[in-house]
Image (cartoon, grey):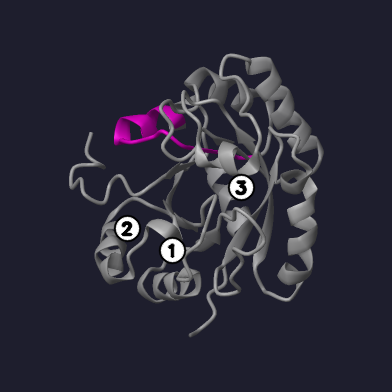
Amino acid sequence: MQQRIFNIHQQILEAKKEGRKLLAVLLDPDKIVLENLDHLIDKINQSPATHIFVGGSIVQATILEDLIAQLKQKTKLPVVIFPGDPSQISPQADAILFLSLLSGRNPDYLIEYQVQAAPILKKTNLEVISTGYILIESGNETAVARVSKTKPLNRENFDLVLATAQAGEMLGNKLVYLEAGSGAKNAVPLKMIQLIAQNIEIPIIVGGGIVDLHGIQNAYKAGADLVVIGTAFENDSHFFES
């Protein structure tokens, strides 16, 4: 397979500068049936998606390599690993979000897993994008909170969330990811996105609890540079219609 070359971080920066909004579809290998993948890829190719994220809080399935290989063959979109731990690394992808869970104080997710992943990543050609990952309370316990054994930040404590995002920026993170979590009851508050967008310079990713086009557009208007959706659109042919 011919190696595709993307500079994904630079592309995100350029899109932010130009006011172009980006959209990622998140695929959890544990929820993917390879026999149905062609249909899903067709839906992604017909959608406004600009990126494909692959990963999950717990990836027990062994299809990660096959999934990424098929995505690379059948789409032109960059494939970015969104890892839950160091086992979710594939050299076949184009990039990896090198996450640090800034909202929690579990050292495994702040630095330990990153230490374990670094020697593995050094042996690949993956573009490594340092990302401050901030989990926001969403009305119910999400897989991220359960697996990481951390509490999300209070969705009403805007000052704490902003300070956490600013700390991530000062630490050198290239992106900030505001996450309500998979299956979130409530998305990240729009006023919170707006506050952070007005007070940091690096691009903002927003995901979790966004289930329709209206939610995507609202997140963009609030200041999100890249919105992440799950596969809610797969069985809804009108998902991207206003």
Return the residue nearer the eye: 165 or 120.
120
Q: Position of residue 51 (x, y in %)?
A: 46, 56
Any magenta on residue 182? no
- Quote the CA–CA distance across marks 2 and 3: 23 Å
What kind of residue is marked 1? Leu
Dot 1 crowding, Cα within 10 Å, few <14, some 14–19, many 20+? some
The residue located at (60%, 53%) in the rendering is: 84
Inspect the magenta stretch and tell me whether residue 215 lies in it. yes
At label 2, counting other C-alpha atoms closer than 10 Å, the crowd grade (few under 14, some 14-19, many 20 or more) is many
On screen, residue 166 above or below 17: above
Residue at x 69%, y 31% (from the top left corner): 165
| Circles 2 and 1: CB atoms closer than 8 Å | yes
Q: Which residue is mark 2?
A: 44
Front-lying residue, 150 or 111: 150
Q: From the viewer's perspective, is residue 166 above or below residue 128?
A: above
> How far apart are the alpha carbons under marks 3 and 1?
17 Å
Q: In the image, which residues are magenta? A: 203-219
Label 3 sits on a secondary structure element that is helix
Q: Which mark is residue 77?
A: 1
**Which residue sits at x=79%, y=69%?**
119
Name the residue at 44% across, 75% down. Answer: 66
Please name the residue that numbered disc 3 is placed on.
Answer: 13
* Measured Cα–Cα span from mark 2 to mark 1: 9 Å
Residue 145, quarter of picture: top right
Can you say which quadrant of the picture contains the C terminus? top left
